[in-house]
């Protein structure tokens, strides 16, 4: 049986956040020059934990508005957008990755 879409989004986002070269803090996404961009922008090359959820949803839909709509139920599993961004920005990548792993384990 296939996983619910929010679990698929979380797993793809975890892969992005898990790669230190594709992770950032304090901005949803950055381009290769370090300038802030929308998470769904083709120029984005690094994402925060929340931005990774949005771009993972975007990869499934190809629609920015729908991507944000799909990221909402996924981010709620992390305690909400503010909680996830706070972990990402203050605790760092390793803690964000551990949080992704904890959420993923809830969906065997």
Image (tube, rainbow, N blue to C red):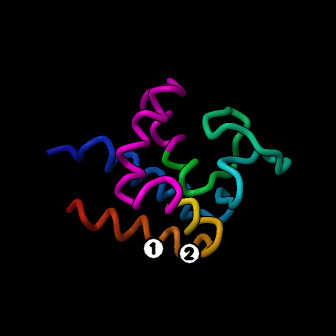
Residue reaching furthest right? 33
Taking the spot 55% from the left edge, 57% from the top edge, the residue there is 49
Asked which secondary structure carries label 1, the reply is helix
Q: Crowding at label 2, few (<14), some or many (≥20) Cα neighbours within 10 Å?
A: some
Residue ID for mark 1: 98
Left or right, residue 83 beside residue 22: left
Relative image position of residue 6 (x, y in whole percent): 33, 45
> Pointer 2 and pointer 1: residues touching (CB < 8 Å)?
yes
Instruction: Confirm whether the magenta stretch covers residue 73.
Output: yes
Foreground of the two, 67 or 61: 67
Taking the spot 39% from the left edge, 68% from the top edge, the residue there is 101
Relative image position of residue 14 (x, y in whole percent): 47, 58
Relative image position of residue 23 (x, y in whole percent): 65, 59
Q: Crowding at label 1, few (<14), some or many (≥20) Cα neighbours within 10 Å?
A: few
Q: Give residue 94's mark.
A: 2
Counting labels gives 2
Instruction: Confirm whether the magenta stretch covers residue 48.
Output: no
Relative image position of residue 32 (x, y in whole percent): 80, 47
Location of residue 103 (image quadrant): bottom left
Left or right, residue 75 beside residue 89: left
Taking the spot 20% from the left edge, 62% from the top edge, the residue there is 108
Foreground of the two, 81 or 63: 81
Left or right, residue 71 beside residue 104: right
Q: Give residue 28's mark.
A: none
Please identify the dominant SS of the magenta region. Answer: helix
In three-dimensional space, the C-alpha distance between marks 2 and 1, rounded to whole angstroms, equals 6 Å
Taking the spot 45% from the left edge, 38% from the top edge, the residue there is 57
Residue reaching furthest left? 1
Q: Which residues are magenta?
A: 54-83
Asked which secondary structure carries label 2, the reply is helix
């Amino acid at each position: 049986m296939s996983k619910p879409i929010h679990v698929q989004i979380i797993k793809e986002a975890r892969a992005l956040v898990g790669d230190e070269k594709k992770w950032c803090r304090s901005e949803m996404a950055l381009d290769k020059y370090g300038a802030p961009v929308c998470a769904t922008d083709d120029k984005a090359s690094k994402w925060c934990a929340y931005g990774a959820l949005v771009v993972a949803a975007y990869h499934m839909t190809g629609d920015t508005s729908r991507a944000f709509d799909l990221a909402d139920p996924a981010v709620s599993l992390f305690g909400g957008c503010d909680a996830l961004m706070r972990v990402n920005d203050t605790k760092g990548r390793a803690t964000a990755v551990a949080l992704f792993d904890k959420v993923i384990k809830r969906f065997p």
